[in-house]
Image (cartoon, helix red, strand yellow):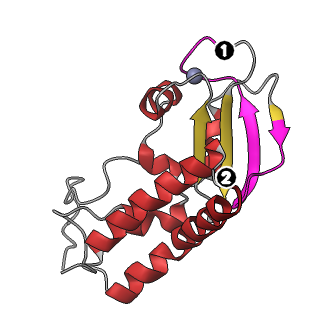
Amino acid sequence: MTKAPTETGQGPRHEAPHQHSTVPPFDLLLSRCDTTKARKQSPARGMTRSITVRCLAHPDKSPSLSVSEKQNGDVVFHCHAGCSKESILEAAGLEVIDLIHPDNRYAQRIKPHAGPKFSAWQALQAMATDVIVVALCAAEIRRNGWLKDDDLDSLIEAESRIQDTIQAGGLLR
Ligand SMILES: [Zn+2]
């Protein structure tokens, strides 16, 4: 009996084409930023860490890029000089998925053309953190009549993820 080699090195190409980091997104983004002159801040509502660093997407002498880590580990950021999220991501060499904590990504990967179907219950579980953000922001608006920039960023991101999850979970059929 001889043992024929079965692996030719040309296996099926079903692995993800892009290797994503397992570093927390907050630390990953900061590792791409110039953190000299960085100012640590007390985290906004619903955040665990917040810092202001020099923006990557425009010549930034004094820090104007607010970076915050959400309680679920996702990162949100906002340039007070008005740079777009896309331009900052590009300058950082990151993709949108890199802003999502690895533990939260399974719900983000779902696209209409690929991936397993998730049960409504799984979809609801995936949305729990975002629903809390929306609730906190709603309470803040009720109390103050307005939202801070960072909270608004969180609200917008939560809303868009909730929409994605509603679709992926088939909650509106
Ligand atoms: Zn900027």
User: Quadrant holding ligand 1?
Assistant: top right
Q: Is residue 23 magenta?
A: no
**Residue 134: quadrant of the picture:** bottom right
Badge 1 local density, few (<14 within 10 Å), some, or many (20+)? some
Nearer to us in this view, 78 or 93: 78
Residue annotated with mark 2: 69
Q: Is residue 53 magenta?
A: yes
Q: Amino acid at mark 2?
A: Glu
Magenta-drawn segment: 40-59
Residue 42 location in percent, x, y?
83, 48
Residue placed at 51% from the left, 24% from the top?
A: 83
Residue annotated with mark 1: 60
Residue placed at 59% from the left, 65% from the top?
A: 138
Q: Is residue 160 left or right of residue 133?
A: left
- From what the image shows, is residue 64 above or below residue 121? above
- Does any portion of residue 27 appear in the rendered image? no
Nearer to us in this view, 27 or 138: 138
- Element type at marker 1? loop
Q: Amino acid at mark 1?
A: Asp
